[in-house]
Image (cartoon, helix red, strand yellow):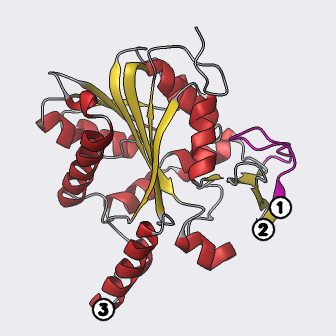
Amino acid sequence: MASTEPVPRCPFCMADGPRPRFRHGVYTIFACRACGGGFASPRPHPAELGTVYDAKYAATYASGAMNTIDFSMRRFHDLESSLRRYFPAVLEGQRKRVLDVGCASGGLMSEFARRGWRAEGAEVSQELAAAARSKGLTVHVGDFLRLDLEEGVHDLITMFHVIEHLDDPGKVVQKCHALLRAGGVLVMETPNWRGIGALLRGSRWSHLIPPEHLNYFGPAALSSLVLRAGFSTARAVTITPQVIEAVEGTPRLVRHTVRGVYQLATLLAIGTTLQVFAVKNNQSQDREGRHTP
């Protein structure tokens, strides 16, 4: 059963007065009037969250399109291209350290390791972590907030489709800030609550699936979250995902048509997938993201 405790304010920007928008079973999906983000309430108990990422969850992921070498290679190349455009310095030098939070079976980590990065992962699923470790990768298993990780040493932290799952996304982003060195970069990707799919489908949007997905971000909401954690938000972009799961298995013409619509939406800045690149400044920052001496 979900907790009956109410969520009094937006967990991203801490504004009061969110409005109820949708109902999903015992959950209400609220929309924040200030940052435009969405979140599920009541928040589930930790024990309930633990049952979501069981062996069945791992098996479903392992059989999906995202658990392929080709998918991991394309994700790496797209990420490398974006970093070269926005933060080229993070790609320079030898033996850079990357932490992939929510690393699953280690596909992206393997691509980093092949190119000389010192790659580590964090994963809540025992089964997926075991699959990554079988490839010779270093994986820290368990609740990310409880993991004992070295602070101030990582050049890059990646979080692909993780932030929407978290009970306390703010604390997780704060921990990422602490783990990065000065000048280090955090990259997050998540479904876009302000994208064409969510706008057209409303309550039927495929990502409204509490308690698996608890948080729903648009550019403003995710930017607010990283600013509050001490980052300087450098870039928020929307993109077309590599895999459009809703049309997988449909005729090729349908897949190509949907992809064309999604690509047009990306050009209009309402793409279905949101990416945020945030840098840890050399100076300290206050909770509003302003520089302080």
Measuring 51% from the left and 30% from the top, which residue is drawn there? 232
Residue under numbered circle 3: 253
- Asked if residue 182 is positioned above or below residue 42 in the image, the reply reads above
According to the picture, the residue beneath numbered tag 1 turns out to be 20
In percent of width and height, residue 117 lies at 19, 29
Q: Nearer the viewer, residue 151 or 291?
A: 291
Q: Position of residue 292 (x, y in %)?
A: 60, 13
Dot 3 amino acid type: Leu
**Type of residue at label 1?**
Pro
Q: What span is in magenta?
A: 3-19
Q: Which residue is mark 2?
A: 23
Measure the alpha-carbon separation of dots 2 and 3: 34 Å
Residue 17 belongs to the span the image colors magenta: yes
Q: Position of residue 53 (x, y in %)?
A: 51, 49
Circle 2: element type: strand
| Residue at 24% from the left image edge and 59% from the top image edge | 71
Quadrant of the rendering where the C terminus is positioned: top right
Q: Nearer the viewer, residue 202 or 82?
A: 82
Q: Is residue 51 visible?
A: no
Question: Which marked residue is nearer to the observer: mark 2 or mark 3?
Answer: 3
Q: Secondary structure at mark 1?
A: strand
| Residue 45 in sight from this viewpoint | yes
